[in-house]
Image: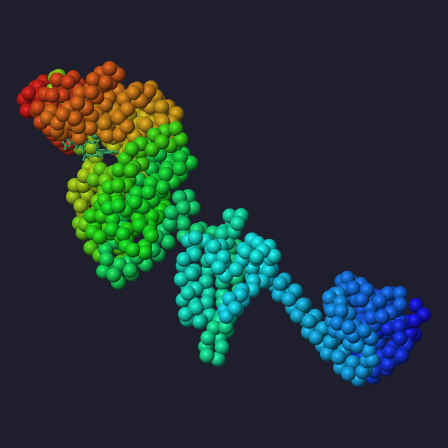
Amino acid sequence: MNSVKKSNANVKPNPTGALVLVIDDDQTTQVLAKRSLENAGFKTILASNGVDGLQLFDRYRPDIVLLDVEMPIMDGFKVCREIRSLASGRNTPILMITGLDDIDSIENAYSIGATDFATKPVNWAIMVHRVRYLLRSSIIFKALEASKVRLAKAQKIANLGNWDWDIKRNKVFWSDQIYRIFGMNPSDSRLDRKSFFQFIHPEDRDNLKTEFQADLLQLKPSNHEYRIQCENGDIRYLLQQAQFTLNANNQPLRLSGTIQDISERKITEEKIRRLAYHDSLTGLLNRNSFQERLETALCLAKRNNRIMAVLYLDLDNFKRINDTLGHDSGDLLLKIVAKCLIESTRKSDAIARLKNNQNDAEVARLGGDEFTILLSEIKQPEDAGLVAQRILEKLSGPVPLNGHNVFATPSIGISVFPEHAENSSTLLKNADTAMYHAKQCGKGNFQFYTEQMNANSLARLKLESDLHQALENKEFAIYYQPIIDSESGQIIAAESLLRWKSRKHGLVKPCYFIPMVESNGMIVEIGKWVLQQSCKQNAAWQHAGLKPIRISVNISSLQFRHTNLLDTIEQALQASALSADYLILELTEGMIMQNSDQTIQTLQKLKAAGVKISIDDFGTGYSSLSYLKRFPIDTLKIDKSFISDLPHDKDDAAITTAVIAMAHSLNLRIIAEGVEKSEQAEFLKHLGCHSMQGYLFGKPMSAENFQACLKNSQSSNEVISIEKTG
Ligand code: C2E
Ligand code: CA
Ligand code: CA
């Protein structure tokens, strides 16, 4: 180390003035170098052989090295190679100085990493400038390197890469991050301008190509979002932004741009969009998004002079299924229905399709069991009817649900733009009104909106608000309809039928107000009153000395499920002192088919209390006689829809015959309802139907009229016999 000059000892690594390491065994060169460089403001350290030079390099990290080639111990080439192999020496400028000026030495020097080359004798005045120049490039180079590192880091963080297309030479530069975004190694050579489009998602490819062509024509900054499909199957969402560089003649020289992987953002956006716009159970649109789409579709329809329709759909039995089989089953059914609605509206073979519009229909769940469908591609209103028909057909059969077969038939209302409404809210409201009408028309059908329905629905609203006072105002009355024994023709029972004698609306039939009081819960209170009144009335007839008959009272499902039904009945019987034997409860199949233990228990308790159970409207519901066998029931009332066309309608005749025969075999009493003609009565009597009810024997009438009728019947024995009244 004796060759290291003392003057270097205080030189700190990386001083402000650049530090030059001179490695040369020639004393004269060392002195000249030191003097010239220091005069020019550099700091120097000197080494007179390669080994010392390397040590100094490692210790002081000079900004530049002047290196003699011919030296003892270790020549300049070797020193240069060693320096380059150090991490700290990779980019330090090394200027090699030699007396050899043969081309081989020069080539050798460059090949092992020398930055520049000078020959002896050295002109130090010029050399100083050369050192300064080399240092300046080195600084720029270092800054560039640092900036590259920073850029790469930033690109990695932003998941963004940059590219540059030299249009003339048709060469594209891709930054490392772009390769990573495309799921490749930066050394991969497969990414070029041609292959680029192969990575684009097939659904986005043509679109992107077209847009790209347009960009080339317009030479404007561009902005595209598309998806790529990586080799591992991943789909990524990319945002590409680019700008042209033009020459003086506005010819494009290059297109430079960025590609950012925005998948994460897209996925989050999609999630938020789904949450905000869709019903989480079925995945269908929710109410808000349906309304939005409806608005948009309306604008388009107005502009293009086209028609469209809204279908409003409500399941007929949903509440019962939900209550009976539980919410999980209910949810499952809603999902099945949703799927079915989508399927029914997708294949729009009967519907004219507009070009470019992929969606046939928008299907939404508004909540509960209410669905809406927007048909914006119909040619005529009837097309909406066809879709409704298709839905009804699809949902007409039994749906298997957790081991049960249930029916999910809907009632559908349709309103058409512009015929029925001009704005979205009225369109929706009218479809709802039409749906309500479909329910009233016996469910499981569809109805187009009419003006009349609106008037009806307004009247209905009025009616509903007035109903609240009806009980208090004593506006309810009970009418009684005779039930006669087929053999004797004598009145053996009366059915209690509720009437609303409204001060404002006149006599209102139960088919108008019973569904209302059922849906608002008032039926429990009203039904209790009917029970009390009916028992009281029947007891009164007995007190009046008439032969006892039974009183048959309709019970609504809400009442039946109400925990107090048994108490209510017992109280009614007690208060009227009527024997339970004279009370019949009319339940519908649907009510008792709710196969819960509770149903059977309630029925058994009623039975034990001595009350008779009658199944009303038999034939319109499940109609499973073998199933009914499990319940303690006494009587079946064949629904009047099977009676009205007797005896001529073959189907009705066959059904009635079969039902009566089976009822006999099950030891059940049987009543035919709605008997209006004597030929019906004859036919039924012939089949062995025990009792009958209908206008033929008497319409529902007031208690006084009924009493007179009863008195008459009992005194003359045969007043209401079949033969005589026919
Ligand atoms: P429902 O239990 O099936 O009652 C028989 C209905 O058929 C009665 O209609 C009756 O007037 C009608 N009817 C009787 N004979 C004939 C006939 O020969 N031909 C025709 N076409 N119809 C006949 P109403 O009184 O209008 O009652 C309608 C429905 O309202 C009843 O049907 C019942 O479901 C319900 N309802 C009546 N009163 C009450 C009640 O107090 N509580 C409950 N929950 N429902 C009631
Ligand atoms: Ca009834
Ligand atoms: Ca009935």
Residue depicted at x 35% and y 34%: 321
Q: Is residue 383 visible?
A: yes
The N terminus sits in image quarter: bottom right
Please tell me which residue is depicted at 73% across the width and 76% down the height of the picture. 134
594 vs 471, nearest the viewer: 594
- Horizontally, residue 467 falls left or right of residue 143, namely left
Q: Quadrant of the C terminus?
A: top left
Q: In which quarter of the image is residue 558?
A: top left
Q: Residue at x 41, y 70 (%)?
A: 217
Which picture quadrant has residue 549? Answer: top left
Side of 711 relative to 639 (left or right):
left
Q: How many labels does the image show?
A: 0
Q: Where is residue 442 in the image (x, y as percent from the top left)?
A: 22, 37
**Picture residue at 17% right of the left edge, 30% below the top:** 641
Q: Is residue 6 above or below residue 522?
A: below
Q: Where is residue 386 in the image (x, y as percent from the top left)?
A: 23, 44
Q: Nearer the viewer, residue 246 or 125?
A: 125
Is residue 531 positioned above or below 57 on the image?
A: above
Task: Give the side of residue 603 with respect to residue 637, left or right.
Answer: right
| Coloration of the structure image | rainbow
Q: Is residue 472 visible?
A: no
Residue 156 percent coordinates (x, y): 60, 60
Compared to residue 103, the image places residue 403 above or below, namely: above
Q: Quadrant of residue 319?
A: top left
Assign ligand 3 to one image quadrant.
Answer: top left
